[in-house]
Amino acid sequence: MEFIIKSGNPEKQRSACVVVGIHEPRKLSAAAEQLDKATKGYISNILRKGDIEGKIGQTLMLHNIPKTLCDRVLLVGCGKERELNDTKYRKILSTTIKKLNETGAMEAVSFINNINIKGRDTAWKLRETVTITNDTLYCFDQLKSKKDKTRRPLRKVVMMVPSRRDLAEGERAIVEGNAIAAGVKLAKDLGNLPGNICTPTYLADQAKALGKTYKSLTVKVLEEKDMKKLGMGSLLSVSRGSRQPAKLITLEYKGDKKNGKPIALVGKGLTFDAGGISLKPPTAMDEMKYDMCGSASVLGTIKAICKMRLPINVVGVIPSSENMPDGDANKPGDIVTSMSGQTIEILNTDAEGRLILCDALTYTEKFKPDCVIDIATLTGACVIALGKHASGLMGNNQPLVNDLLNSGKTAGDRAWEMPLWDEYQEQLNSNFADMANIGGRDAGTITAGCFLSRYTKKYRWAHVDIAGTAWKSGAEKGSTGRPVPMLTQFIIDKCKD
């Protein structure tokens, strides 16, 4: 998809389609007013006939508009002007792109980004146009023998800005938007691949491919023998039940010439989670291929920052394994020793994500990070608590948590803070080891965070539970690429500090 920034009047655009907004009730946007004036009231006459009210989700395609240079004009409902917000703006963009892709226009000039969104500037609106366009047009069909092809798909979007003074800022917005979109696409593609293709070895190979593409990136993969020497008994206990060898993947991006402390991203990479001996129920078990979406988000975020060449240092750490039932798999009641020396009683083998993450979090200390953010499809309890809209967030440093919350709001990839109080730690007590790997039915998301917190005392840390947000089920089943937008925005913001 090609994106171009221009300034000018709608009636003077020589294009297959010009897009303007209509507010509810039947109110012309500024660009629509310009077009209406140039066409001697053509647009307002259409509105009086009641063909479009202006509600979000409505569109109306017009052909052969007099005194214009375009083939078509697409009217897009933008809702009530005073009620416009980030979420509604994204719905307007998605509706616009879907309609344009159906028309066969192939290219369009859009004035939608000129509508007013409270608290958002032109650059933000342009960047959202780029990311939402790519998100809307995303399709995963690489494993289908027969692909559904749009005959004349949308290939170019020209985004109009109010003034030539906005052009330079607009170009930067396109660069950011394209980079984030590329990172999201990588995360989606990896998430949507089945477990027989996307194995720990496959993830390691994808990381190595990124390292070959970007000179600023160094990739290293530890094998099971290396992890054994490091004492990663917790991580390796999970991979024992699988025929696929575990991998510990590290990616070091160096964009800061001053060698500043890196931001560390730690992503859970369970390429398939059958639950181990504590076998999951068969319903929707196929979706457990998405249990590696934390690792996919780390790879996607690093790809985005590489494309933007951000002046900052970032480390990605990905512990990757499968969790399968086998004669050598973890058993309920087993006790393992983590890299930190702390012992863990495994009461449920399906609480394995924290077992691989804890060793990865200890390993991350070697990079002397400024802060550490782990990302994991960790608990079904998070879906019960927050549904599919917000990721769960907790941490040991309130400024870090606040920064992530704000980044999520900006990027439309929101999280919600959950408590990490000492009272919850008692639920992890074990009679036989330093801790149990589960804390009972109550507050499952929080006690999982409490477990991880015991391995993060040496640095500022935040935990993002994406069990509810990493993928969609049902008719729209597929990876969402979250939280790549939030993480990338967080890193962009840190570059400005």
Image (spheres, rainbow, N blue to C red):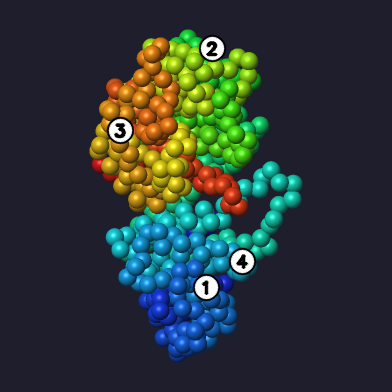
Quadrant placement of the N terminus: bottom right
Q: Earlier in the sequence, mark 4 or mark 2?
A: 4
State if disc 2 and disc 3 touch (CB < 8 Å): no
Image position of 86 with respect to 246: above or below: below
Image spot of residue 329 (x, y percent): 58, 17
In the rendered image, residue 232, in percent from the top left (x then y), is placed at 46, 15
Task: Name the kind of residue labelled 1 in the image.
Answer: Thr
Of tags 3 and 2, the one toward the viewer is 3
The amino acid type of the residue labelled 2 equals: Lys
Residue 171 in view (yes/no): no
Query: Which numbered disc covers residue 225?
Result: 2
Q: Secondary structure at mark 1?
A: strand
How far separated are the C-alphas under marks 3 and 4? 48 Å
Q: Earlier in the sequence, mark 2 or mark 1?
A: 1
Q: Earlier in the sequence, mark 3 or mark 4?
A: 4
Quadrant position of residue 116: bottom left
Q: CA distance from mark 3 to mark 2?
A: 35 Å
Q: Residue at x 50, y 57 (%)?
A: 133
| For residue 75, side relative to residue 487 (left or right) | right
N-terminal label among 3 and 2: 2
Mark pair 2, 1: CA separation: 60 Å
Q: Which residue is mark 1?
A: 59
Residue 481 coordinates in the image, percent (x, y): 50, 44
What secondary structure is marked by label 3? Answer: loop
Q: Which residue is mark 3?
A: 420
Judge whether 122 appears above or below 234 on screen.
below
Q: Is residue 226 above or below residue 410?
A: above
Label 3: how many Cα within 10 Å (few below 14, some 14–19, many 20+): some
Q: 465 or 230: which is nearer to us?
A: 465
